[in-house]
Amino acid sequence: MRQNLNAFFLLAIIGATILAGCSDGPRPRQTPPADDTLTVVDLAGRTLTLKRPIKRIVLMRSLCIYELATVLGDEVEEKLVGWDSSLKTGDQDAYEKFVQRYPGLKELNVLGDVLRDTVSAEAVLALNPDLVIMSTYMRDRNSKGLERLEDAGVPLLYLDFTDPFRDPQRSILLLGEVLGKQQRAEAAAAWIDRQFAEVTGRLEKIDSPAPRIYLEAGTLGASQYGNTFGSDDHGKLANWGSVMDQLRCRNVAAGSVSGMYGMGVISPELLLTEDPQVIVITGAHWTAFPDSLRLGYFADPEQTERQLSEYANRPGWSNLQAVKSGRVHAIHTRFGGHITCFAAAQQLAKWLYPNELETLDPEARLREYHERFMPIEYSGAWMTSLKDE
């Protein structure tokens, strides 16, 4: 009898609860969650607090689309609301590749240039960004536009690419934390670290003399000497100068060129005297330089090789060891300071030590990186060598 009564009261309580839930009376209001915030230290050492979710991103150096796309994948089109023109002018093939994949990027607001201090703070503010992504080298430009953005409280997040073997990974890990894509960023960074370790581990076992190398930006074509790479104004290695410094070779331009970004033109007489054993010309698709060495997503390997042969025909170059031994090569210029630098490290090391590092396959690794982590497909020509006649 007691069990029957207990069951009766239990059913009555349940029924009353259901009826109350179905009534037309007012329901208790739920308190909306407070804004989700995240405090991080960026790669310029600045502490900033960001409101999440981050839905509107401005990329003040559009060449960093490689890093942002690695972290965001297909979300890059919906979240990117503005960028500068550096991708279109300095890596036209990549611009076209991304626009093909994400047509909306073609309609993005193109903002000013930090290097020329033409950034319009008003134009950036009009986009109502949740995040503005910068590079640390921009901090030295004393840009009035950036000052106005900081004064307006716009969240500026600085990435860094000073050390191309490590900083790109640190940059995508920071982006992963900020954008809630930690797992994706950590997987990419770990994979890249393994590619670098594959090179540095093998180089440590080599005890032969370090070969001499000359590396030149192929911006101007073979008729004029382009920039080579050494140290910046503060004596710090940068860009390709840092890459070569970590590959057990002797950069013939080290100590003879310097500048704001560690670049300058070597004296032809000095180059002939140094007699490099390996020569590498970097290429891309620079829209302002029609004679530049073409490499990238839409490059034709045969055209690139024809252009490369013109370098070997420069006055006096036929006497250089690199030319006589067929060790004249070309590689994409953006490898020097971006997330794909692992491909440059492997390829340069293989050109420097072809016997010891014969089994390295940097092109296959670059293709694999695209398949694993990039939302666009691998294509074109990124590295090549001058074939013997």
Image (tube, grey):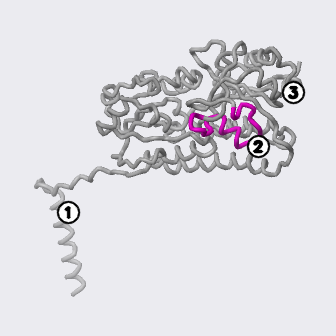
Distance in Å between CA atoms under marks 2 and 3: 19 Å
Tell which circle, 3 or 1, labels the residue nearer the N-terminal end.
1
Give the x, y percent position of residue 268: 75, 20
- Specify whether residue 280 is painted magenta: no
Q: Which mark is residue 248?
A: 2
Task: Locate the C terminus by quadrant.
Answer: top right
The residue indicated by pointer 3 is 321
The span shown in magenta is 232-255
Amino acid type of the residue that numbered disc 2 sits on in the rendered structure:
Arg
Q: Nearer the viewer, residue 197 or 222?
A: 222
Looking at this view, is 367 or 265 the one in front? 265
Residue 18 is tagged as 1
Residue pictured at 20% horizontal, 77% vertical: 8
Q: Is mark 3 in CB contact (under 8 Å) with mark 1?
A: no
Label located before the other in sequence (2 or 3): 2
Answer whether labels 1 and 2 touch (C-beta < 8 Å). Answer: no
